[in-house]
């Protein structure tokens, strides 16, 4: 299984992990997404009704932790991370709007089509973002 992300996700992730209060985000991302199978990643709230390409909102680190938005392409075994936000702290907020969720979905489809993605890999205990192009 390969894990990819959009520029929107990469930029938001980089902004969050600079803050001490969100230092656990990187570990949460690694623990949830790496070395997991599709069935394990299919849990969470489905934002669409697709069985083959579910759009998922997932809680990481409990109810006051983070919200992760991602797309699974089950046939290909790929995960596409689209957005993350904290629920608490200085940069925290409750939820994103339905319009934002729709915009993220359109963005990830465009990025997949144009190969404008980052491939994620773990080196030691850090996530590295390698441009796909």
Image (cartoon, rainbow, N blue to C red):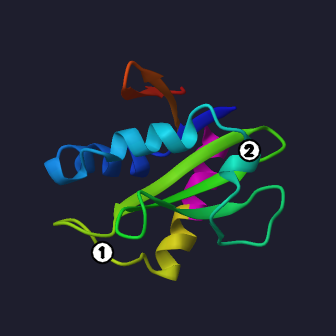
- Residue at left offset 15%, top offset 47%: 20
Tell whether position 111 is magenta: yes
Q: Position of residue 48 (x, y in %)?
A: 71, 72
Magenta part, dominant SS: helix
Q: Is residue 105 left or right of residue 63?
A: right
Q: Residue furthest top?
A: 124
Q: Is 7 in front, or is 39? A: 39
Q: Quadrant of residue 97?
A: bottom left
**Secondary element type, mark 2:** helix
Q: 10 Å neighbourhood of mark 1: few (<14), some, or many (≥20)?
A: some
Seen from the viewer's position, the closer of residues 43 and 80 is 43
Measured from the top left, where is residue 1 in percent x and y? Answer: 70, 32
Front residue of 22 and 95? 22
> Where in the figure is residue 69, as x and y percent of width and height?
53, 60
Residue labelled with disc 2: 38
Region in magenta: 105-115
Residue 10 is covered by the magenta coloring: no
Judge left or right: residue 34 versus residue 9. Answer: right
Number of numbered tags placed on the structure image: 2
Local secondary structure at mark 1: loop
Q: Is residue 128 above or below residue 3?
A: above
Q: Which residue is rendered at x = 16% and y = 66% of the image?
A: 90
Residue lying at 53% horizontally and 44% vertically, measured from the top left: 32
CA–CA distance between discs 2 and 1? 28 Å
In the picture shown, does residue 62 fall above or below 7? below
Q: Residues within 10 Å of mark 2 (few under 14, many from 20)?
A: some
Q: Residue at 53% of width from left, 71% of height from top?
A: 101
Residue 71 is labelled as: none
Q: Which image quadrant: the C terminus?
A: top right
Question: To which residue does mark 1 refer?
Answer: 93
Q: Earlier in the sequence, mark 2 or mark 1?
A: 2
| Position of residue 4 in the picture relative to residue 62 (left or right) | right
């Amino acid at each position: 299984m390969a894990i990819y992300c959009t520029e929107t996700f990469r930029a938001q992730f980089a902004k969050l992990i600079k803050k001490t209060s969100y230092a656990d985000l990187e570990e949460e991302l690694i623990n949830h997404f790496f070395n997991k199978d599709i069935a394990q990643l299919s849990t969470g709230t489905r934002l669409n009704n697709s069985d083959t390409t579910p759009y998922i909102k997932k809680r990481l680190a409990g109810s006051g932790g983070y919200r992760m938005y991602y797309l699974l392409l089950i046939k290909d075994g790929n995960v596409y991370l689209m957005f993350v936000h904290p629920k608490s702290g200085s940069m925290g907020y409750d939820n994103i709007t339905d319009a934002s969720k729709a915009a993220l979905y359109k963005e990830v489809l465009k990025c997949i089509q144009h190969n404008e993605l980052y491939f994620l890999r773990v080196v030691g205990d850090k996530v590295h973002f390698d441009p796909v192009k």
